[in-house]
Amino acid sequence: MKKNPAYDSLFRGLTLFFAVLWLIIAGAPFVFQIMTTFKSQGEFITDGLFKLPNSINFKNYITVIRGGFHVYFFNSMIVLAVSLVLLLLMSAFAAYPLSRMQFRLNKPIYSAIVAAMSIPIHITLIPVFIMTIRFKMYDEVYGLIGPNVAFNLPISIFILTSFMRGISKEMEEAAQIDGCGRFSTFFRIMFPLSKSGLATLAIYNGVVIWNEFVFAMVLTQSQDTRTLPLAIWEYQGQYSINTPVIMSLLVLSCLPVIILYIIGQDKLVKGMMAGAVKG
């Protein structure tokens, strides 16, 4: 069938138009956020919201950094790093037998994991709070790791199980013929081949854990143990909110997530497309 040049030009023009439109819609809040960080509180209140700042200064960023930003950042990094390592390892250990082994409880266990994805995390606040106190982990940084791993584990196992099912069985069978047991096959074959899926989970869960607010608020109290989402409370009073400083805090908080996405965006796309085409 012969292609129509006019149709192709129209299609490319519409695609470009909607792409630019979406870029404007998605980028406008971020541009507003950046512009606000260079304004003073008075300038933000008296001038228009989208008016350019009168001058470029970094006073708000300096205020955030001097206000204990490093403490919140360090706590968030600890929670994120430990939670992601545990989450990815546990997801891989659970997804491998569910995707490659046939046993009697395979389907019931998988169904229970899928059902656990529908449980709202907020209904568990009181039980988790009581458990944290009994284990003497209240107001401790490591007390946030358990809930982050537990509530992100079902969807991680679900995604990684589907990913591992798309890996060719011939490679696993060849490894077993060469004398590899289940553990060797997992660590030498399945785990390396699942890097794209693990990278997808790392980015997805990393954003969720980095922005987690509810459990961090309930399970911590002091400034030394709180994470970045709770740092906003330090810059609001009973009757006023220092919006430019809060915007500066949000910009600094977004940077690690943006860097993580830039580093792993290729693996994220591969992980999302895995299984779409099977050879």
Image (tube, helix red, strand yellow):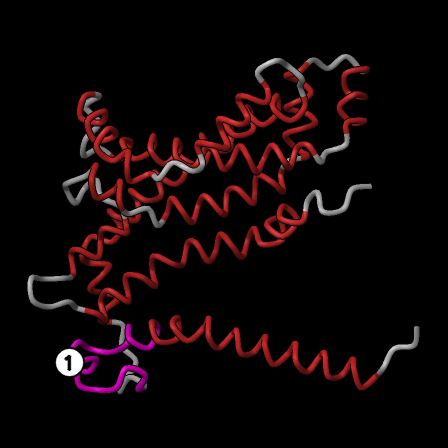
Count of numbered tags: 1
Q: Nearer the viewer, residue 93 or 117?
A: 117
Q: Residue drawn at (72%, 34%), measured in percent from left and top?
A: 167
Q: Residue drawn at (23%, 50%), measured in percent from left and top?
A: 230
User: Is residue 29 covered in magenta?
Assistant: no
**Amino acid, disc 1:** Gly
Q: Position of residue 16 (x, y in %)?
A: 64, 79
For the residue labelled by badge 1, is the local secondary structure a helix, a strand or a loop? helix
Q: Considering the image in quadrants, where does the N terminus appear? A: bottom right
Label 1 environment density (alpha carbons within 10 Å; few <14, some 14–19, many ≥20): few
Question: Does residue 182 appear left or right of residue 38 in this picture?
Answer: right
Q: Which residue is mark 1?
A: 42
Extreme residue in the right direction: 1
Q: Position of residue 226 (x, y in %)?
A: 22, 44
Q: Residue drawn at (60%, 24%), measured in percent from left and top?
A: 98
Q: Position of residue 15 (x, y in %)?
A: 65, 76
Q: Position of residue 256 (x, y in %)?
A: 41, 54
Q: Nearer the viewer, residue 4 or 222?
A: 4
User: Is residue 41 covered in magenta?
Assistant: yes
Q: Nearer the viewer, residue 44 or 23?
A: 23
Q: Which residues are magenta?
A: 34-51
The vertical placement of 127 against 69, above or below, is above
